[in-house]
Image: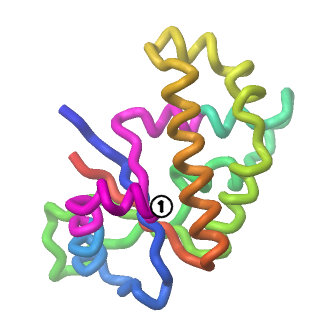
Amino acid sequence: MSIYLHFRAVAMAEIRDDHSWLAAFMFEAWENRVTEYAAGLSCSINKGWDFVNDLYTAAAPAGDTAVDDTRTLPVYGGRPVPHTPEADPSDPPMMLLEPHEVSAAARFLSAVSFDELWAVVGATFTAFGWTKEELLHHHRDLEALYGRAATAGHAVVKVVWA
């Protein structure tokens, strides 16, 4: 079974802060994902987004116990979009990352060294079946998506599809 975390950049002015509306919007984006990927509007991670998040949280300096929310913005950042009473309960969970958070995520992704992160977590991730190339692919997709979204002043909506 495949389960995806789907990311879609969108102008805040185009968003309705309503779970049902966003679910329909994201479903249409998912149905058009090939075109949207090519246009740089979206990307997705199949099953392994927790590993991508773990890769980014490895960016903490050794011995640093402080939580840096910037590291978690690309994958888990944002606020949940709550189901409204009239929403379909089968609608998937969603998060909304506001434009200022998208900019912070973009700055983090452009500044972090993938090779340095891989040096910290690579052996562990390889034991779980992940390759450096797979994670580098996800990193590049997220870096490009967040970079374009930040430049345009857009938000990013995240949804889990099962």
Q: Is 70 contained in the magenta span? A: no
Q: Residues within 10 Å of mark 1 (few under 14, many from 20)?
A: some
Q: Could you say where residue 92 lies in the image, as x and y percent from the top left? A: 25, 59
Q: For the N terminus, give its image quadrant.
A: top left
Q: Is residue 33 above or below residue 117?
A: below
**Color style of the picture:** rainbow
Left/right of residue 17 with respect to residue 103 in the rendered view:
left
Q: Could you say where residue 157 lies in the image, as x and y percent from the top left? A: 43, 67
Figure quadrant of residue 140? top right
Tag 1: amino acid: Gly
Residue position for label 1: 40
Span highlighted in magenta in the image:
27-54
Left/right of residue 146 with respect to residue 113 in the rendered view:
left
Closer to us: 152 or 59: 152
Q: Residue at x 69, y 49 (%)?
A: 109
Q: Residue at x 47, y 61 (%)?
A: 40
Number of marks: 1
Q: Could you say where residue 125 lies in the image, as x and y percent from the top left? A: 55, 18
Q: Residue at x 73, y 27 (%)?
A: 115
